[in-house]
Image (tube, rainbow, N blue to C red):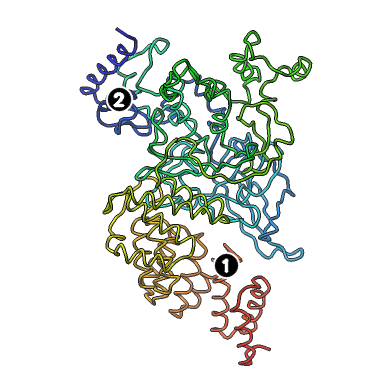
Amino acid sequence: MTLRFRSLLLITLAFLVMLLVSYCGNGRHAPSEPVAPVASNDPWLGHNDTAHYVGINTCKQCHMEIYQSFIQTGMGQSFDTASREKSAARFEKHTVIYDKASNFYYHPYWDGKAYYIREFRLSGKDTVFSRSEQVNYIIGSGQHTNSHIFNTNGYLHQMPMTFYTQKGTWDLPPGFEKGSNTRFSRKVGLECMSCHNAYPEFVEGSENKYSQVMHGIDCERCHGPGSVHVALKQTGVRIDTSKAIDYSIVNPGKLAVDRQFDVCMRCHLQGNAILKPGKSFYDFKPGMVLSDFISVFMPRYQGGDDEFIMASHAARLKMSKCFINSLKTSDSSSSHSLRPYKEGLTCVTCHNPHVSVKVTGKEVFNKACMSCHQPEKKNETCSATTASRKAVNDNCVGCHMPRSGSIDIPHVSVHDHYIRKPQKKEDVAAVKKFIGLYAVNEEHPTALIRALAYVNYYEKFNPQNTALLDSATYYLDKAEKQTSGGKSTDAYDVFGGRIQVLFLKKAFTDISKQVNEKGKAWVMGYALKRKGAANSDAWTAYRIGESYAEMGKRDDAGTFYARAVELEPFNLDFESKLGITLLDLKRMDESARVFDFIIKEDPKYASAQNNRGRIYFYQHQFDEAARCYNKALALDPDLLPALKNQVDLLNEEKQYEAAKKMLQQIVTRFPGDKDAPVLLKKMKALHLIS
């Protein structure tokens, strides 16, 4: 009897026991009924749909030593509530950063146990605006950064200050620089949260609302749902893992080479992530094929080999000869995805995920290098001189994986995992030329997925390169030929992709033509429910609504905004667009209900406060209108519609000099605005102001 057969037999017997015994667990998601076996071609029992996550506190009951070590790692400390113990930042009385583009200053401070970030604006030495928000969560282990999140009724937003621990400096967060400061409004979506933390309880139909968030990446992100494993151990089933694999829980170190990489690349492959139709960021489990759920694309540049982003470790490692050569065997036809775990250089060859790199000595990594590059092997010895090697204590990593800055995160240096000989300066200076996008974790993505990758890359990362949209259209044409039409998932995703391309091109009339060709009933009639992910059909409806709004067709716009809201009722941007359209259509009561809902959900949604004020103004409830406008401007002093609405209110109340003063401020702060100068001239012509 083979060891594999014996272990499977034990598990089968255990399931017969489980059919008779109900499971009582103390974990977060304990199953209430026996778990059925998985498909015969998938040995991992945790992949069954009825397997549940049990939480790190359940795991530590049997694995306390590993738990104590793991919670000290970067993963274990990736996310937590804001506290002095969690924060790695330095706090000084005069710690202030200034964003010249937005003319805002930022200052972090503690008030007792509460942590705040204050935003303020100066006119000379006078403070003319101030807003403080409490930090609820700190994201980042502190090895590289601490960024900050605040919570409003479950809606999570990133805050405009990050502490960069390697340099000990405060600055704007990545992506907030160069005029892109979104202040307190950047949404923390599920894609971000699901890599920087354990799986949260996500409110479906939202972009960034959570009913519960965990405190750090936990065991099951790498080992998969643990309910089956726990149940088996409670029934007395034991497997000697030194002799056989325990298929009730995934041990990533025992997976085939590509499946090992998939576990790590789920998060350590930051890039242009494209969900497969019908999939969400929750669906992948360790031991599964990542490309069945997500394809991650990266740009390829000729002459750009030295540039990399922060979380690109796996992609860079796969470029290395060390990795490529580790897969070579006498049987060149075999697929490395099926190779045993010992026949390939993977992340766990060098990294013990249960031990922090801070306490892992350099000798551990160098020993991994020397396990292949042994002096007695021909052509495997280091070409550096003995003297130069001794000068750095034979530190292979320092030479062949040098530290450098990533192109996406400032003030941070990391080891480049593209293992190679040190490059000469003239090699580094090569001119970059964009070649295209490639899927790091998939050899042959479909035409549809390629199309979505190009349009997504244009929208999120490179909106200057319109050729990306041409590439997207090329692949959408190919994808359309592969669909059978009708209400198939692919047919709707191809249509949605076309709408997105046309929307980004501002080809609003063409969008209307596309809708008319398909028929509004077809366009409105399909909604693909994507658990825990933004609903692409909702976004398609939103973009169509926006197009009709741009064309002045408010009734049609309202119809499609309403459809977007129906599919994503907690997407407050969709709600806001619907509310504005209803307001423009003079459907005041309906519009008021929309904005009341938004404000109830997130009272810090500035434009909703402003638009609720407009409704009060039209209803001649001027005190209520003023209250809403003031709330809006207390959140965003540069909200131009609220400033203009205040002018209207001051004129209505015959406070002409105050209105004049505000109009002059608008002219100074918004030189491109055409309305304020015209209104000033009108008021002078009517002798309302001097």
In the displayed structure, 662 sits above or below 229; it is below
Mark 2: secondary structure: loop
Residue at image position (54%, 79%) is: 649
Question: Residue flagged by tag 2: what amino acid is it?
Answer: Asn
Where's residue 84, x and y in %? 62, 39
Residues under labels 2 and 1: Cα distance? Answer: 58 Å
Tell me the tag on residue 41. Answer: 2
Disc 1 on helix, strand or loop?
A: loop
In which quadrant of the rendered image does the C terminus lie? Answer: bottom right
In the drawing, what numbered circle is on residue 378?
Answer: none
Q: Is residue 204 above or below residue 73?
A: below
Farthest residue, direction left: 20
Residue that mark 1 sits on = 639
Q: Are marks 2 and 1 in contact (CB under 8 Å)?
A: no
- Graded by Cα atoms within 10 Å as few (under 14), some (14 to 19) or many (20 or more), the crowding at tag 2 reads few
Numbered disc in front, either 2 or 1: 2
Q: Where is residue 590 in the image (x, y as percent from the top left)?
A: 36, 70
Under mark 1, the amino acid is Leu
Choose between 149 and 102: the one closer to the eye: 102
Residue 43: give x, y in percent of width and height.
32, 23
The answer to whether residue 261 is seen in the rendering is yes
The structure residue drawn at horizontal position 40% and vertical position 69%, both measured from the top left corner, is: 548
For label 1, the crowd category at 10 Å Cα-Cα, with few meaning under 14, some 14 to 19 and many 20 or more, is some
Name the residue rendered at 40%, 13% in the picture: 241
In the rendering, at what x and y percent does residue 404 appear? Answer: 68, 35
Q: Is residue 158 above or below residue 690?
A: above
